[in-house]
Amino acid sequence: MSRVYNFSAGPAVLPEEVLKEAADEMMDYRGCGMSVMEMSHRSKMFETIINEAEADLRDLMGIPDNYRVLFLQGGASQQFAMVPMNLMKNRVGDYIITGQWAKKAYQEAQLYGKANAVASSADKTFSYIPDVSDLPISEDADYVYICENNTIYGTKYKTLPNTKGKTLVADISSCFLSEPVDVEKYGLLFGGAQKNVGPAGVVIAIIREDLITEDVLPGTPTMLRYKTHADAASLYNTPPAYGIYICGKVFKWLKNRGGLAAMKEYNEKKANLLYDFLDNSKMFRGTVEKKDRSLMNVPFVTGDADLDALFVKEAKAAGLENLKGHRSVGGMRASIYNAMPMEGVETLVAFMKDFEARNG
Ligand code: PMP
């Protein structure tokens, strides 16, 4: 068996311990004679799996009792619609546009009500997070929406916006469980699992109870109401059962490693190694304002498209996969999620040094 260092933005690297455990349990999950993939979602066995997953996630994130944890489907993109459908009582949402995913959410919200772009970093190709300390928040805004970590551009909010009392909604797809979070600052957090949490197909929403109501926009499908899933404890219909099982294993892996504070420390060490190299390199440079740098997604360029392409090709041959930047920005991007080991980043930096020496 040979595994590469996988720097994909998502679906992304998962902890080897988790994959091995899942492999061991594939044919016969804990003596029940079948895999979790083949198991009824109404079985006692699965009930334990989903309940433990939720309990471990609550533990990890310190989720207060007045928040519900929902295991959903439809990708993070489906939340772009569910948020306005469920939360737009006045039909007004304020959006901060820090990249493509925030923009997509903003555009989707326009289908349902008035979406206001109250700040944007589009002027500099989303290479920074705008000042969010005193925004023109709409008086009748139902919520303020952010994409907390911008997967494509590699920026992350270091301080949350001053929402002037309005509910904060955050897409945390690419920073999920990468560091401690103060859940109470948000009304709703959601993320696709396929970066830091588990396989694609699972979306986790953490929502304050008072935001779960029957008062949704007319025509909101049953499946797109938070209340449907909250009332049924995420078992209204068949959930992405196998994905939830893997997420549960990742939660236990994180707890064994010391939880989110320890994860943050480890992630900072990894990111700093790469950022320090970029800051001192004569060939490579990071593309993001230093103060807004993400710990998870690190975009960088040489400034020469041919050299970038050569780098990506040679890196792949050396077992460093998926370093090509997003098609909309070019260059390179190293996604270094929780499950990327320190040795992966060390190997990448050593390879970059060597590449620079050979091509500089
Ligand atoms: N939000 C962010 C921050 C993302 O990075 C992505 C996907 N890469 C999405 C939303 C869309 O997720 P999905 O493909 O699960 O709809």
Image (spheres, helix red, strand yellow):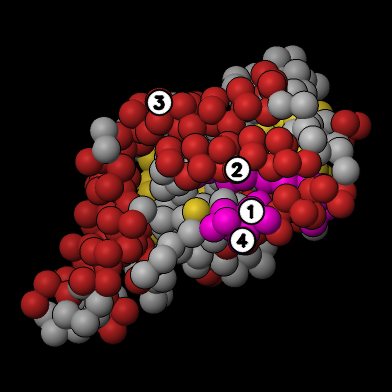
Task: Check disc 2 and report the residue beneath it.
Answer: 351
Res 315 label = 1
Image: 223 above or below 322: below
C-beta proximity under 8 Å, tags 3 and 4 = no
Residue extending farthest to the top is 134
Question: SS of the residue at dot 4?
Answer: helix
Q: Are marks 1 and 3 in contact (CB under 8 Å)?
A: no
Horizontal and vertical percent for residue 84?
A: 67, 50
Q: Ligand 1 near label 3 (Cβ, under 8 Å)?
A: no
Above or below 31: residue 101: above
Provide residue 290's location: percent of width, then percent of height. Answer: 69, 21
Mark 2 surroundings: few (<14), some (14-19) or many (≥20) residues within 10 A: some
Of pointers 1 and 3, the one earlier in the residue sequence:
3
Callout 1 touching callout 2 (CB < 8 Å): yes
Q: What are the residue bounds of the magenta stretch?
A: 314-337
The crowding category of the residue bearing disc 4, from other C-alpha atoms within 10 Å (few below 14, some 14 to 19, many at least 20), is few
Circles 4 and 1: CB atoms closer than 8 Å: yes
Q: According to the image, label 4 marks what residue?
A: 317
Residue type at mark 2: give it. Answer: Phe
Labelled disc at residue 265: 3
